Amino acid sequence: MKAVNTPSRARRIIGDILLVLAILLFADVVIVMLHKINAVVLKADYQDVFQYQVILCTILLLFALDIRFSLFTRWKPTAVRIAGWALRVIVVVLTVVILFFCGKVICGSMINNAGQADHAIVLGLALENGKPTDDLLARLNTAQTYLEKYPEAQLILTGGNADDVSGRTEAAVMCDILIDRGVTEDRMILEDQAASTKDNFRNTAQIIDPDRPVVLISSNYHMDRAVQTAKRTGFSDILRLPAPSSFLSYGANVMSEVVLELNELTLKQ
């Protein structure tokens, strides 16, 4: 087959930029997720998410390659180019969907409307080899600052996945850390039976009134999906307080959220 048109200089520059971004995102996903799979309890869950992340990153990479090299329509004969155009349309549509959900997750991470409430829910995060991750510690830092600002508030620490190394749940580890920092036990309630975010909220709804205002504390990239889950489980007045997250793993975490949001959307159909 013989190549036809060559992309313009402007298109090549844009393609080079997109290609670099796609490769960096792909590398971030692989490095971060392989580390998590080897370090956390719920390995099978992370493996499933990783497989779909690879598919989404491959679509973005194909889109960048097509921008840079006219990957799908640069060949003769005509029949091959027609097939290439069909593939291009599919890749473009899928890329738009992926970028839409990425934007949704990122925009959701920027909303902070936390105010005074009786309770703040701190969502847990899988321990890595028995130790809290930097993102989990950031959630605790945010929670501690909230307690200092609102002396009458209580924290509900959630997470029931016991670690293989320490045997402790996420909620118990968070509680111990906050006690070491000087937070008194009467300001914390443990919800240490849940195995998922949905279970966190279902169990918490049995502890507090879901119709009253509640502050939700989680990593910024997780906030959009967490709020949606809270609403589906009966919480009606949710105040967002996102915690900062690691810049180096942000891309991989956003892609994880996109995979999980697409999965939930599919299950609702």
Image (spheres, rainbow, N blue to C red):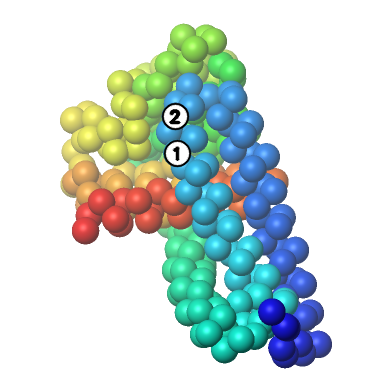
Above or below residue 127? Residue 103 is below
Q: Where is residue 121 in the image (x, y as percent from the top left)?
A: 37, 37
Q: How crowded is mark 2: few (under 14 residues within 10 Å), some or many (20 or more)?
A: few
In the displayed structure image, the side of residue 116 where residue 210 appears, left or right: left
Is residue 172 visible in this depiction of the protein? no
Element type where label 2 sits in the image: helix
In the displayed structure image, the side of residue 199 where residue 67 appears, left or right: right
Above or below residue 213? Residue 92 is below
Q: Residue 194 lies in what quarter of the image?
A: top left
Q: In which quarter of the image is the N terminus?
A: bottom right
Q: Residues within 10 Å of mark 1 (few under 14, many from 20)?
A: few
Q: Position of residue 113 (x, y in %)?
A: 43, 57
For the point 35% across and 51% down, the residue is 263
Element type where label 1 sits in the image: helix
Mark 2–mark 1 Cα distance, whole angstroms, equals 6 Å
Above or below residue 259? Residue 189 is above
Three-letter residue code for mark 1: Asp
For the point 64% across and 39% down, the residue is 32
In the displayed structure image, the side of residue 120 where residue 250 appears, left or right: right
Above or below residue 4? Residue 39 is above
Closest to the observer: 123 or 20? 20
Closest to the observer: 76 or 8? 76
Three-letter residue code for mark 2: Ala
Is residue 18 visible in this depiction of the protein? yes
Marks 2,1: beta carbons within 8 A: yes
For the point 60% across and 71% down, the residue is 63
Q: Which mark is residue 48?
A: 1
Q: Where is residue 12 in the image (x, y as percent from the top left)?
A: 77, 81
Q: Which mark is residue 207?
A: none
The residue where tag 2 is placed is 44
For the point 19% across and 38% down, the residue is 209
Q: Quadrant of the C terminus?
A: bottom left
